[in-house]
Structure formats: structure tokens, C-alpha cells
Image: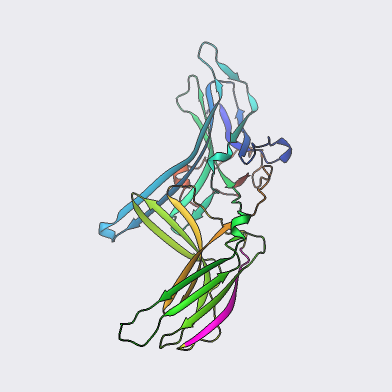
Amino acid sequence: MGKVKVFCVTINTDPATIPPAVPGGLCVSGSIVIKLKKPVQVKYLNVQLHGESKCKWNEGSKGNARIYSSIDVLIDLEQELIRSDESSPYVLNQGSHKVPFVFQVQADRHLPSSYACGQYGYGRIVYSLSARMSQFGAICHEKASLIIQVSNPVPLNMALHEQPAVAEDSHTDCCLCCTSGPVIVTANINKSGLAIGSGETLKVELSVDNMKGMEITPKVCLIQMTKFRAQRNYKTLTKAISAEKQLGQPIMPKTRHNRSSYVIGPIPPTVCGNINSTNNILVSYMVTMKGSRFKLLHPIFLGTGQTPYPNSQFRGLSSEPEEDPDVPPMDYDSAMFAPSHPGQPAAVKY
């Protein structure tokens, strides 16, 4: 039997014990918990904060499939908590020990929130804490890791996103000798951005000149577009965020329809904001207005408002480990596309 009974990583959940973050930055503090059956001589004890965005997908038939994958390292910080040499080793005595650590992340890193997309695991943004301890005279190292949930607010630029927007499109698909005219669509949108979970709504007013020889039924919807990039190839997933709404009566041929109003929202808090700070995952939102002969897209920015989350908000993980945890530390690479770690993950907020 080994000398180490428990070796695990925890983060602080008590607001009174969390150091203040740098303005606009991120603070992650916690402890490495060690329970020993016998004294050990520690060669080194390290802790690492790591975050990456990773995407992976297959294309082609079963016999000729090609795998595209990409990893973008967002943050990789390491601290050496204990270091000693064999002539003067650092001794941890029998019993329980807590070795504290603090990571201060500057605001200019612009870290995106934790994110997962795709039923088949096309891409994730994952953050983890890992600890490693080496002992003099021991062949194996002690290792432990913890997946943490980072919630980074995406602030809205009120001067920009509160401004109304106008989108216009014209579509003609007949020959020069045809008497049928184009379809001209004009959309007036009351703002260019929405705060997630705020109860705000988006108002879209649609005007359609239907000069064609067939009726048109416009539909309006808010969609999420997620683009993955790997090895100069792209994969795009589209998902409806709001229910598709359509005009009650079709617009008849050679007629003009003015000012049909559509309300989109509110946006539930489970929806993530725009993500544009990674090299391989991009999340954006579009108001799509379409009919049988036209399609009009206009970008909408989804954020979390002006007020950032307090640095002191954490949830979901006790600062004390189990007496004898039976679950081995999760392998980081497999955790990227595996279900969440058992139990509610810890959260780190700006």
C-alpha cells in the first residue's frame, strides 16, 4: 500500500476566502488536499490552470472518412508550490494537509466561457486544474485534476447595440422578357444586441413588396451559428434559438405589405453569448427573415449586459474531499468529449 491516502484538487467556494481579482480579470483560488498514512519526502508539488478550445469532426464515407481536429490553447499557467532537493527534502508528516494556491488572470486575455456544442461532441471550451506531486524514492507520481466551469460575462456595448438597424434585400429570378418584378424586403430591427436572461425582446418590423406572380409567406427566427475550423476546413452548425414566427396571411402577388411586427425573445439564461476570441470556434447569432423567394440575414449580438459577474460567485463543489474517493481523476483529453464529471461542476466567474 502507498503512503498517500487522498490527493485531490479543490477550489474555494466561500466568498470570504476568495482573493479579489484584478479589475476585469479572473481569480481562481483553492487548495491541494493531501492525506498521508506515513510521512513522505516531497521532491516537488505543482498545480496547473489550463484552458483550451477543441473541435473534431469526420467527413466522408465510412471507408474513406477523414478526421479534422484542432486545439487552441487559451491559457496555460503553472505554479510550483514545493521544491526541494535530496540533501534537504521537504517532509509532509502523517495526517491531512492543505496547500493553497491562487491564479490571477489578467483581463487582456479575453477568455471565453466554458462551452459545449454538438450532440456528437463537435467542439468544447474546457478549463481544468491539475496537480502533480513527486516523492523521493517513489517510482510513480501522484496526479489529480478537476474540470472547472468558467462563466465569463460578454458585455454589451450599449452605445452600439441599442441602436436600431435596417436590413434590405431584393431578389429576382426570372428572365428579361418576363413581366414579373422582384421581391423587395425591408426589415427594421429596434436594436442590434440583447442581454441574455434579462427579459428583453427584439422587435422586427418587416415590409415586403411582392412584385412576383406568386404568393409569399414571410417567416422570422433567431438562429445560432457555430463555426468550427480545423486544418483550413470549416464545419457550421445552425440551431434555432427562438420559435419560427410567420405572417398569418400570405402576401398576394403584385401587392405591398407594410409593417408586420415580430417579437423575438426573451433569451433564456442557458444560451451562451457571442464567442469570437478563439481560433477554432466561433459562435454568432442571426435574425433570419425568409420566404419562398428571399432570405435576409442580420447579425444580432447576444451578451450578458454591462455588469460583470462578481468574482466571488462560485457553486457546486465542496472545499473538502470525500474521505476515500473511489473515482479516479478524469483524463483531460477524454473529458473534452465525454459527459460531464459526476456531480455538478465547480464554477469560476469573473
Q: Is residue 124 visible?
A: yes
Q: Which one is in front, 46 or 51?
A: 51
Q: Is residue 292 visible?
A: no
Prevalent SS, magenta region = strand
Task: Give percent across and percent down for residue 27.
Answer: 62, 37
Residue that appears at 46% across and 64% down: 238
User: Residue 299: within the magenta?
Assistant: no
**Is residue 130 toward the left or the right of residue 182 in the image?**
right
Give the position of the C terminus as an image quadrant. Answer: top right
Height in image: 52 above or below 175? above
Task: Give percent across and percent down for residue 271.
Answer: 57, 59
So how many labels did they put on this image?
A: 0
What is the image's colouring?
rainbow
Q: Single out the residue that lies furthest toward the top.
A: 87
Q: Single out the residue that lies furthest toward the right.
A: 16
Residue that appears at 59% across and 18% down: 91
Task: Give percent across and percent down for residue 124.
Answer: 48, 51
Task: Give percent across and percent down for residue 246.
Answer: 54, 79
Q: Quarter-wise, where is residue 346 in the image?
A: top right
Q: Which residues are magenta?
A: 255-267
Height in image: 167 above or below 24? below
Residue that appears at 64% across and 54% down: 305
User: Residue 258: within the magenta?
Assistant: yes
Q: Quarter-wise, where is residue 3 in the image?
A: top right
Height in image: 117 above or below 91? below
Height in image: 120 above or below 313? below
